[in-house]
Image: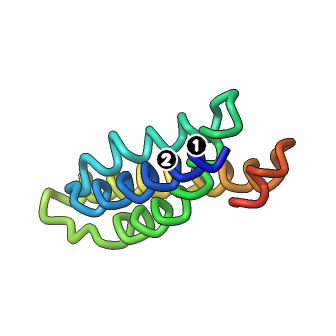
Amino acid sequence: TVEEATVRNEACETAKAIAASLPDESYRTEYADMLSRLSRKEWFTSRMSAANLIAVGYERMGLGAGGSDGDGGSGMADEEAATAAQQCAEHLSNFAALCRDDAPMVRRVA
C-alpha cells in the first residue's frame, strides 16, 4: 500500500544518511553486509530496499577500494583493496540479480 511504500522509502533515505556518516571500516563490515543480506531476502520488499541502496553502496565501496593510501602497511592496504574489490563484485552481482528478479516491483526499483 501507499503507507508501506512511504515507510520503506523513508527508511531507505535514513539508511543512506546513516551510511554517509559511517567510517569506512564500519561501512565495509556492517553496512555493506546488510545490503547483501537484504538483496537475498525472501520478501520482495526487502529486495526493493536493497535495489534502492546498492547503487549508493557500490559507489562508496569503489571509493574505498581506490582510496587506501597504504599508511597501515602495504600488506594491509592490499588486503583492504582486495576486500573492497570483492564486495564491489558481490554488490554488482546482487544488483544484476535484482534487475532479473521475478517480482516486477523489484525490477522497477533496480
Q: Is residue 7 left or right of residue 5?
A: left
Residue 107, numbered label: none
Image quadrant holding the N terminus, namely top right
Badges 2 and 1: C-beta atoms under 8 Å apart? Answer: yes
Residue at 34% in and 65% down: 64
Residue at horizontal 27 percent and vertical 58 percent from the top: 77
Tell me the quarter of the image containing the C terminus. Answer: bottom right
Report whether 64 appears left or right of 51.
left
State the count of labels.
Answer: 2
- Going by the numbered disc 2, the residue's amino acid type is Val
Label 1 secondary element: helix
Q: Nearer the viewer, residue 37 or 93?
A: 37
- Using a 10 Å C-alpha cutoff, classify the residue at mark 1 as few (fewer than 14 neighbours), some (14 to 19) or many (20 or more): few
Left or right, residue 29 beside residue 51: left
Task: State how far apart marks 2 and 1 are (Cα).
Answer: 5 Å
Say if residue 53 shows up in the picture: yes
Q: Amino acid at mark 1?
A: Glu
Rendered location of residue 36, percent (x, y): 54, 41
Quarter assignment of residue 20: bottom left
Which residue is label 1 attached to?
4
Q: Nearer the viewer, residue 77 or 3?
A: 3
- Residue most extreme to the top: 42
Q: Residue furthest left?
A: 71
Q: Considering only vertical position in the picture, is 6 above or below 33? A: below
Give the residue drawn at x 42%, y 62%. 61
User: Where does label 2 land, which residue?
Assistant: 7
Q: x, y (%) of residue 15?
A: 37, 52
Q: Is residue 86 visible?
A: no
Q: Quadrant of residue 33?
A: top left
Q: Residue 24 location, x and y as percent?
A: 25, 57
